[in-house]
Image (cartoon, rainbow, N blue to C red):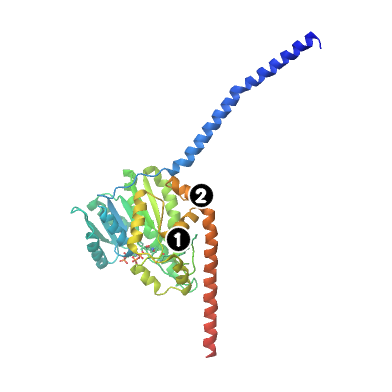
Amino acid sequence: MSCEDSFSSALLDRISFNFWWLLLPFVMILVVAAFIVAFVLLLYMISPLISPKPLKLNGAHVVVTGGSSGIGKCIAMECYRQGAFITLVARDEHKLVQAKKEVEKCAINDKQVVLCISVDVSKDYSQVESVIKQAQEKLGPVDMLVNCAGTAISGKFDEVEVDRFKRLMEVNYLGSVYPTRAVITTMKERRMGRIMFVSSQAGQIGLFGYTTYSPSKFALRGLAEALQMEMKPYNIYVTVAYPPDTDTPGFAEENKSKPLETRLISETSGVYQPDQVAKVVVKDAVQGNFTSSVGPDGYMLSALTCGMSPVTSITEGLQQIVTMGLFRTIALFYLGSFDSIVRRCMIQREQSKASDKRE
Ligand SMILES: NC(=O)C1=CN([C@@H]2O[C@H](COP(=O)(O)OP(=O)(O)OC[C@H]3O[C@@H](n4cnc5c(N)ncnc54)[C@H](OP(=O)(O)O)[C@@H]3O)[C@@H](O)[C@H]2O)C=CC1
Ligand SMILES: CCCCCCCCCCCCCCCC(=O)[C@@H](N)CO
């Protein structure tokens, strides 16, 4: 190799070496950009998980529709025990007066007041609006609205009277829309508030015998999700409660005409006491949790059916991510057992029909 050759190859090495160094700033920019993107993504993931500030029930005005009986009455009592002022809304005045006495027994100071208002929440919006106005004039703006007025009917799809489908949508769905509409403007102005919708486990799964009832409870979830997205910037938090079978006058009434299949399937989840249910759902609403469920089956159902519903804590989000597949596996077994209940009931009925004919 000549002297000249070795000189030019050294020069070439130098040039290529410098070329790589030239890339370094670009690489650094890329790394920084990647970090920024990852950070922004993380912020996006975390931002819906930030928990709201809990509502102080002491001195707050809580309106409970369906507050004269069952779950609603227990919710009113639970809030009263925490120092709230209560408006009970229902139709029957006699039941309202009785409930007022029971709620008053839970007082923790002598300033607390229970107001009763008799109105049908499902019929006329202007009526609902005017009674809410009355309540606000007496006890101040509503801090929390609990939509608990509702009825359950069970029966086979082709045996339920046709007008019941409309009636249940009126009571359970519109009966929650109207009071919510009546309180929301003031809540938006005050940049605070809580709205609770009392759905049901039958608002998470459609079961035999609930073709009238389930849709009216599923509807509440759609309303709640859309409303929550609109209301979050105003610091208003929406909660959907999904109680299991609960020992109330309404439940006793429903049981009188419940198909055997519905009874057997529902037994999977057991019967709870209304004060147990009230404690859980009030706590969730105060914390601003979007979903409120009761009992282990309730917990599994809520994780399984979370879909695109809002999350209110990091643990809730993580639990959903981790448990969903497992719960779906468990759910397949439940679904299998429900199918077999339905099949067995049908075979039994056909056998007893056949033996009746023979006699
Ligand atoms: N008990 C259970 O197993 C479960 C119940 N739920 C839901 O919880 C809620 C309460 O149930 P529960 O406590 O058992 O029921 P109850 O029948 O014991 O109480 C229902 C309450 O709602 C009121 N109400 C009914 N219709 C209207 C109306 N049109 N306008 C105003 N008030 C009305 C009733 O008073 P009045 O009749 O005087 O108007 C009563 O205060 C319902 O929405 C129900 O679907 C959910 C899951 C399980
Ligand atoms: C992992 C998956 C777990 C699945 C568990 C399924 C349990 C099903 C039980 C359904 C009970 C229906 C309650 C209806 C209550 C109601 O709203 C009426 N009683 C009103 O009066």
> Above or below — where is 335 with respect to 158?
above
User: For the view shown, which residue lies furthest in the bottom direction?
Assistant: 359
- The relative height of residue 131 versus residue 356 in the rendered view (above or below) is above
At 34% from the left and 63% from the top, the residue drawn is 274
> Is any atom of residue 255 visible in this view?
yes
Above/below status of 250 relative to 11:
below
Splitting the image into 4 quarters, where does residue 87 fall?
bottom left
Quadrant location, the N terminus = top right
Instruction: State the residue position of label 2.
Output: 321
Front one among 162 and 354: 354
Estimate the x, y position of residue 127 in percent, counting from the top left: 31, 59
Instruction: Give the class, few, some or many, for how many residues have Cα within 10 Å of label 2's Cα (few <14, many ≥20).
Output: few
Residue 98 x, y percent position in the rendering = 24, 66
Q: Secondary structure at mark 1?
A: helix
C-alpha span from label 1 to label 2: 18 Å
Q: Which mark is residue 297?
A: 1
Element at label 2: helix
Residue found at the very far right of the displayed protein: 1
Disc 1 residue type?
Asp
**Ligand 1 lies in quarter:** bottom left
Q: Amino acid at mark 2?
A: Ile
Residue at image coords 66%, 19%: 19
Mark carried by residue 329:
none
- Ligand 2 closer than 8 Å to label 1 CB: yes
- At a point 23% along the width and 64% down the height, the residue shown is 97
Q: Give the quadrant of residue 200.
A: bottom left
| Residue 190, x across and y down, in percent | 31, 44
Q: Position of residue 142 (x, y in %)?
A: 29, 51
Residue 130 visible? The answer is no
